[in-house]
């Protein structure tokens, strides 16, 4: 075998080895990424569920507060009308 042929074979072997190493590295990285997603996914879902619950509770609280403000304003308006003698409760 000539020196040129040996150099060619060595270069080809080196190239094949590098390609295999890259494949293995990519495979290991994909496996690690999948493992991280599997571990964090339940936690992320739990956090999302908690956030949704908090959002729903906040909306309910704001609606109740809005209703209370509306009733207080209505009572104040009725009180002013009654004081001025234009309310419905005047006989």
Image (cartoon, rainbow, N blue to C red):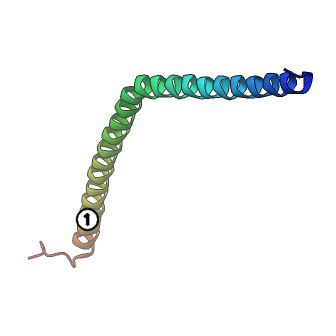
Relative to 23, is 12 on the left or the right?
right
Where is residue 29? Give x, y as percent: 57, 25
For the view shown, which residue lies furthest in the left direction?
A: 91
Q: Is residue 71 above or below residue 77?
A: above
Q: Position of residue 88 (x, y in %)?
A: 14, 76
Residue for point 27% across, 48% down: 60
Q: Please tell me whether residue 2 is drawn above or below residue 69 in the rendered image.
A: above
At a point 28% along the width and 61% down the height, the residue shown is: 70
The C terminus lies in quadrant = bottom left
Q: Secondary structure at mark 1?
A: helix
Q: Give me the residue at 68% from left, 29% from top.
A: 19
- State the residue position of label 1: 74
Rendered view: 42 above or below 64: above
- Using residue 65 as the reference point, say whether residue 9 is left or right of it: right
Is residue 4 shown above or below 51?
above
Q: Quadrant of residue 26?
A: top right
As rendered, which of 33 and 57 lies closer to the eye?
A: 33
């Amino acid at each position: 075998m000539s020196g040129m042929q040996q150099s060619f074979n060595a270069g080809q072997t080196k190239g094949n080895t590098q390609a295999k190493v890259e494949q293995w590295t990519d495979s290991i990285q994909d496996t690690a990424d999948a493992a991280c997603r599997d571990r964090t996914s339940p936690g992320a879902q739990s956090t999302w569920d908690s956030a949704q619950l908090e959002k729903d509770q906040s909306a309910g609280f704001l609606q109740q507060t809005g209703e209370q403000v509306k009733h207080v304003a209505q009572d104040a308006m009725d009180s002013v009308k009654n004081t001025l003698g234009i309310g419905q409760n005047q006989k």
